[in-house]
Every structure is written in structure tokens, then in C-alpha cells.
């Protein structure tokens, strides 16, 4: 099994993918890294990989919009399973004696910087922030940007130190200590919901007629009629028409009292666009 993931080695996605393979019986898997979400989903579309492993939502920063868009607009992309992992951000530097007050430059991806912003403001408010494509990708950027190694740090997974000659200065600097990210394994085949018997959740995407009063409510009432409690609801622009939106709803699924096909059929009748993005189990693990 070839699993593409958002690299490089040392990112949270890299470590989460390793844990998913080790803990949840994804045996005989080859991990293949890609440097962007676009390249990752290109690899799935052209069948260079069998699955892709990607973050989909962070408890602080919210959904990864590019992944939601890919699930919606790319044919034959479905979530097969999801995994929730705590995200503990660390400061790392080539200078193992650096103090927070001496930090002049911070390099990391925007989401990681946002997750640690209160720490940055309290400890090194005058540091210049540099955005990188990934947390692990921040390390080579220090030299690429010609930043001084003695006063520059990166923010990311402590395991970055396994791949670069860099030191862990401080751990768990994220503003919210319960910070976590949901990752998902995405494949080309729509999962067979009949083969799933344990507690699962489903994710749907749909759009309703623009400027039609009550069109969203008419869909949500279907869930109410089935006594389904939504665990998530959000929206993304439809892209081709300003003011039109695609809505995403996630809900727990019990197969002994919910007929999914009947539910899907009712929602389709009320929708201009509809896609079942996956019915899957969510597993949690510690990093």
C-alpha cells in the first residue's frame, strides 16, 4: 500500500502517519512524502499512491480548507478513516543556549505560529516571523533566508531534532494545551458503509439554491426528523458563483437505527450539489 503524506519528514503529519500505520494495522505500507497539499492530491488522482494521509482540522485553527475543497471538487476522493493526535509545539534552534529574550527570528508554518501566538507575544514580541511551507521545512529556510543561526528558532514537532542537527529549547509552547489535530486517510473508492458495524461518523457536502429563504433549514430539518445530532457544520465558498456556498455536516452514525441511503436520498432532493465524503471511524492516539 502506497500512502502519500504531507512532508517533509519531521512534520506532525509525518509522525501521525507513522502512528496510524503502527497502531491501526496499516501493514505493508510505503510512505511517500509530498511537499504541498496540491501535489498530494495530484498523486492520488493520477494513482501514484493508493491513499493520502492529510490533516483536515485543528482544534485551535479550524479546518484545513484546501483538504475540504479537494474532497468536494476532486472526483473519487473519500475519507476512509480519521485519527486525532495531540499537537505539542516546541521551539528548536541550532543554538542550544538561546534564551527567549534573545530570539530575533521565528520560522514556521502559519498554523503553528498562530497556535503559539500568545507565547510569542509574551516571550519574544519583537521577533520577526517568517512563514514556511511546513514545520520541518522551516529548518532549511534558516540558511536559505540567510538568518543568523544564533538568534533564530523554528516552531514544530520535537522530533524535527531526529532529522536535523538542531536542539529542543522548550516543549509544549502552544497556547491551548489541549491542542489537537484530526488527520484522515483518503482513498479513491467510496467506502462500503454496509461493511462498517462499529460506531462511526459520516461527513457530507451539499449546496442549496442561492437566495432561497429556508433552503438550508429544509436540509437541517431532515437530520432533526431522524433525531441525528450534528457534531460539525461549516461552509466554504462554492467558487464559481459569488455568494454561493457548500455546507459540510458531520454526524455520528449508528447503523442499527439510521438508514443512510434513505437519509442521503432525502438530502439530495433538497440540494443542488451533494457528495458523501465518507463514513469512517475516528481513532485517537498519543504522539
Image (cartoon, rainbow, N blue to C red):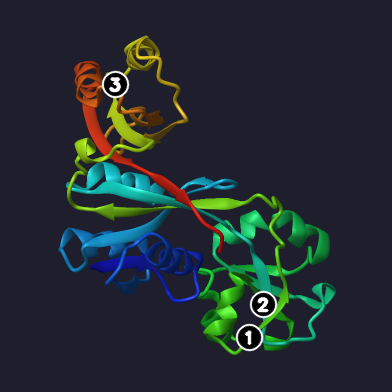
Image spot of residue 229 (x, y percent): 45, 22
- Rendering quarter of residue 158: bottom right
**Mark 2 lies on residue:** 92
39 is higher (above) or lower (below) than 149: above
Query: Of the residues tagged 1 and 3, which is closer to the observer?
Result: 1
Image spot of residue 189 (x, y percent): 17, 49
Q: Which of 226 and 73 lies nearest the eye of the viewer?
A: 226
Disc 1/disc 3 C-alpha distance (Å): 51 Å
Residue 126 placement, left or right of 57: right
Residue at screen point 32% across, 45% down: 69
91 is higher (above) or lower (below) than 147: above
Q: Which one is earlier in the sequence, the residue at label 2 or at label 3? A: 2
- Rendering quarter of residue 241: top left
**Mark 1 lies on residue:** 166
Q: Secondary structure at mark 3?
A: loop
**Mark 3 lies on residue:** 208
Q: Which quarter of the figure is the C terminus placed in?
A: bottom right
Q: Marks 3 and 2: in contact by CB < 8 Å?
A: no
Q: Which quarter of the figure is the N terminus placed in?
A: bottom left
Disc 2/disc 1 C-alpha distance (Å): 6 Å
Image spot of residue 161 (x, y percent): 59, 82
Q: Secondary structure at mark 1?
A: loop
Q: Secondary structure at mark 2?
A: strand
Amino acid at each position: 500500500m502506497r500512502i502519500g503524506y504531507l512532508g517533509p519528514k519531521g512534520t506532525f503529519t509525518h509522525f501521525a502517519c507513522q502512528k496510524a500505520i503502527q497502531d491501526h494495522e496499516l501493514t505493508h505500507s510505503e510512505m511517500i512524502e509530498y511537499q504541498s497539499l496540491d501535489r498530494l492530491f495530484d498523486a492520488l488522482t493520477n494513482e501514484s499512491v493508493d491513499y493520502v494521509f492529510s490533516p483536515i482540522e485543528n482544534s485551535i485553527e479550524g479546518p484545513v480548507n484546501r483538504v475540504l475543497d479537494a474532497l468536494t471538487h476532486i472526483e473519487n476522493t473519500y475519507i476512509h478513516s480519521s485519527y486525532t493526535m495531540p499537537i505539542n509545539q516546541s521551539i528548536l534552534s541550532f543554538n542550544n543556549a538561546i534564551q527567549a529574550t534573545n530570539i530575533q527570528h521565528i520560522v514556521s508554518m502559519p498554523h503553528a505560529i498562530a497556535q503559539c501566538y500568545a507565547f510569542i507575544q509574551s516571550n519574544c514580541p519583537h521577533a520577526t516571523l517568517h512563514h514556511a511551507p511546513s514545520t520541518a521545512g522551516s529548518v532549511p529556510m534558516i540558511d536559505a533566508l540567510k538568518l543568523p543561526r544564533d538568534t533564530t528558532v523554528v516552531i514544530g514537532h520535537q522530533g524535527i531534532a531526529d532529522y536535523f542537527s538542531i536542539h529542543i529549547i522548550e516543549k509544549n509552547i502552544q497556547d491551548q494545551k489541549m491542542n489537537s489535530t484530526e488527520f484522515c486517510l483518503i482513498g479513491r473508492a467510496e467506502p462500503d458503509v454496509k461493511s462498517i458495524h462499529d460506531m462511526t461518523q459520516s461527513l457530507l457536502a451539499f449546496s442549496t439554491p442561492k437566495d432561497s429563504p429556508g433552503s438550508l433549514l429544509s436540509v437541517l430539518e431532515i437530520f432533526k426528523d431522524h433525531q441525528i445530532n450534528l457534531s460539525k457544520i461549516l461552509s466554504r465558498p462554492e467558487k464559481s458563483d459569488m455568494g454561493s456556498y457548500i455546507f459540510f455536516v458531520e454526524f455520528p452514525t449508528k447503523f442499527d437505527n439510521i438508514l443512510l441511503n434513505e437519509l442521503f436520498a432525502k438530502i439530495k432532493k433538497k440540494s443542488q450539489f451533494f457528495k458523501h465524503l465518507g463514513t469512517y471511524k475516528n481513532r485517537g492516539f498519543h504522539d
